[in-house]
Image (tube, rainbow, N blue to C red):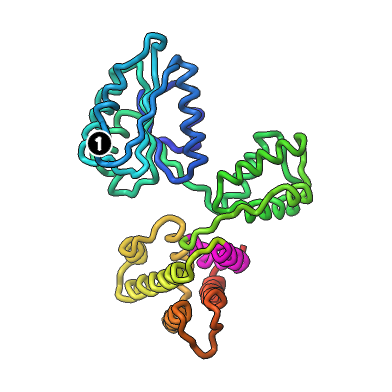
Amino acid sequence: MQLAAAQLASHLQQGLRPLYTLHGDEPLLVQEAADAIRAAARERGHTERSVHTVAGAHFDWGAVLAAGSSLSLFADKQIVEVRIPSGKPGKEGSAALQQLAAGAATDEATLTLVLLPRLDKPTRSGAWFAALEGAGVTVQIDPVERAALPQWIARRLAAQGQRVQAGEAGARTLAFFADRVEGNLLAAHQEISKLGLLHPAGELSQEQIEAAVLNVARYDAFKLSEAILGGQRARVQRMLDGLRAEGEAEVRVHWALAEEIRALKRVKDAVAEGRPLPVALREQRIWGLRERLFERVLPRLGELQLANLLHAAHQVDGIVKGLRHPGWPQEPWQALHRLAQSLCGACGEVMPRR
């Protein structure tokens, strides 16, 4: 049974299944979902808990299988927690997980909780994951995208009895907050909790939030493309400055930018050859938010425009490796800024800046 993360709370109020599998790369949200399951289990008498972390090929899966029958004298029910940080249980682990799933329905004394990182589609199609899904509940924990972050912050503030001012002023305040915590949801949670300690329930002013919220944003070079494809010039500038401050390698940032341009060109060429756009996007392994952005940007990007961007990417490749090119800044980060803003401008002609 698949369950959306937003449905978990109402599901737990209705009753417990014997087996839960959480998979995702957002530590805060995975932790909160796991805590909710544990709390519901404790309310129903699962007072004992054992934790097994799969580390390496020599992990003892027999201990996990035996855990269900090893209740102490002081507990009637227990939680058996299996953490697989790599997301790859291996051959022995795959068999053990399928055995756990098969026995879950008949073991009323044990609730099994399996914690995994974000899984790709082939892994989710494997026999062991299918067994877990068939015997219990699987919940995919997705990250909070930048566009959804202001409302996420607003909901968290509301949960502790606080709110920003209404209207455009409040939207600006939430946007400021989101800029300060982008890419670092755990720190965002901590900053929200700090506001709850500093100020009473009620409306928070922009000045109070600006004074309290630290700049704890963390940026990913591969998230940069989403801002560029969205034509978000200010966010692109902020992300590049943040990546530089964090010590990110210029070569890695350039690769992310150049690969985005190459991907646009490959999809554009495939469509010109007669492939339907959805097929061309799947062939290039482009999906989710990037797929939607590609669909909006590509129809208005011309061949010459893409050729010029590819040539610019080639020149910047030389600059980040120490070469000089007339007409380009010789400082690598300045050249990266110019390349990113050139691509952002091309995409911004299609999509308004946010």
Q: Amino acid at mark 1?
A: Gly
Q: Nearer the viewer, residue 154 or 61?
A: 61
Residue 232 visible in the displayed image:
no
- Which corner quadrant of the image does residue 70 belong to? top left
Q: Position of residue 50 (x, y in %)?
A: 38, 24
Q: Position of residue 329 (x, y in %)?
A: 56, 83
Residue at 28% across, 28% down? 101
Q: Position of residue 251 (x, y in %)?
A: 44, 71
Using residue 336 as the reference point, say whether residue 191 is left or right of it.
right
Q: Nearer the viewer, residue 288 or 217?
A: 217
Q: Position of residue 106 (x, y in %)?
A: 28, 18
Vertical arrangement, residue 216 with respect to residue 159, above or below: below
Using residue 106 as the reference point, say whether residue 201 is left or right of it.
right
Give the residue pinned by disc 1.
93
Magenta part, dominant SS: helix
Q: Which residues are magenta?
A: 223-245
